[in-house]
Image (cartoon, helix red, strand yellow):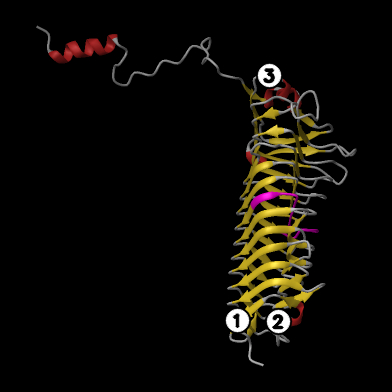
Amino acid sequence: MRPRCVVFLMMAVAAGLTCGAAEKEPSKDVRLPGARPVIDAGYYKSIQAAIDALPKAGGLVRLPPGTFEIGEPLVVSTSDVTIEGAGTATHIKNVNTEGKSTLILRHPSGDENRGAELWRIRLANFRITGSEKSGHGIEARRINEIFIESVTVSSHGGDGIRLHYCYEDPRICDSLITYNKKTGLNLIGCHDIVVASNQFEENQDALRCIDGFNLCMTGNNLDDHLGDGVVIANTYGSVVAGNMIEECRGTAIVLDKDCYGIALSANVIAHEQAGGVDLRDAHGCSVSANVFTIVKANALRIGPQSGRITVTGNTFCDSYIGAGMVRRGTDDRAAAGVVLDGTSDVTVVGNLFSGLRPYALAAEGRPSARVVFAGNVLTDIVGQEKILRDRLTSSLIESNLMPEK
């Protein structure tokens, strides 16, 4: 009678389960049902040739490390495509001098009608650059569920990224968008937009959202822009929160042309030249828990076409760091407060105004109406003897802690 261990060993060998046995490699003739090709662009004559090798059903194009000069735009005209590089080691350099874009995503018909759309294109982990004579960096036209992540877009003559009616769920995350002559990220007619954890530097404007809906812009860093930081126009139901916006030559955040239902919250708005937040045409919006530091003019302006605005829990300050000291010199210390310009139905409650020149709250244009200015703390405000009661009608001004005369 055979020992049990011998019987078991023989059964295991028969089943191919012997301890330490190597797993059998699959046959190269066997393919996972439904699998699409992975295109290695390193084996093609050009990146465009690799993209063109994708089937109509889509697939993945892998870009190798290297610098690849192009004189004509790369064009993607298929849905369900991913183009992925090896990080900044993959550099696509646009040497075109006729204003042509670096990368264009569009339906093969080129039709501008709503039916000519593509779905689910992802761009990831590569760098594209241009010049003053090139066009946009990434130009996407009617691409639904576009996803751009970990992409560097720099030094183009047009916009860095331009999304034209990419209506459904565009996402731009963890990318670096710098030194483009026009807008860093230009969103035209987009809906349910996520812009998160990107860095924008020294574009003309950082971001423009026009004719859109539901922008969620969070956790971005914007620095040194030649124009404005964030411009939102004719857009509804959005949030701009938790961003660092510094040293724009224009205004940090502008709401214009029938904006409504927008929350601006928990942003740091620092050392802007022309203004902090300018509500030019906005209703039903809130400005809360932001820090406006060393904003030289109009830290917050609410214009005559705006109203029904809540302003609460913000800090408007200079660079005071305690014990009578300021971080910056006297000439660079100017810090402004809130300007009401012929507006109405505004609450300014529970804010701190510190070290501002000349006023915490100023009124311009026609008198503003139905304003509540209450529960605020004002300290080190030169010339703030009163809150211009003659420029506010049907308003409530009470319970504020102001400097003694």
Residue 56 - label: 3
Q: What element carries label 3?
A: loop
Going from N to C along the chain, the mark reached first, 2 or 1, is: 2
Q: Where is residue 210 in the image (x, y as percent from the top left)?
A: 76, 47
Q: Is residue 127 magenta?
A: no
Residue type, label 1: Asn
Depth check: 7 or 249 in front? 249
For the residues labelled 1 and 3, the Cα–Cα distance comes to 66 Å
The residue wearing badge 1 is: 400
Q: In the displayed orientation, state which residue is furthest to the top.
A: 1
Above-or-below relation of 401 to 315: below
Q: Does the magenta stretch include residue 231?
A: yes
Q: What element carries label 2?
A: loop
Q: In the displayed orientation, state which residue is furthest to the bottom.
A: 405
Depth check: 326 or 166 in front? 166
Going from N to C along the chain, the mark reached first, 1 or 3, is: 3
Q: Where is residue 20 in the image (x, y as percent from the top left)?
A: 32, 21
Residue type, label 3: Lys
Residue 99 - label: none
- Give the magenta-colored segment's residue range: 223-238
The residue wearing badge 2 is: 387
Discs 3, 2 touching: Cβ within 8 Å:
no
Discs 2, 1 touching: Cβ within 8 Å:
yes
Query: In the picture, which quadrant includes the C terminus?
Result: bottom right
Residue type, label 2: Ile
Q: Where is residue 12 in the image (x, y as percent from the top left)?
A: 26, 13
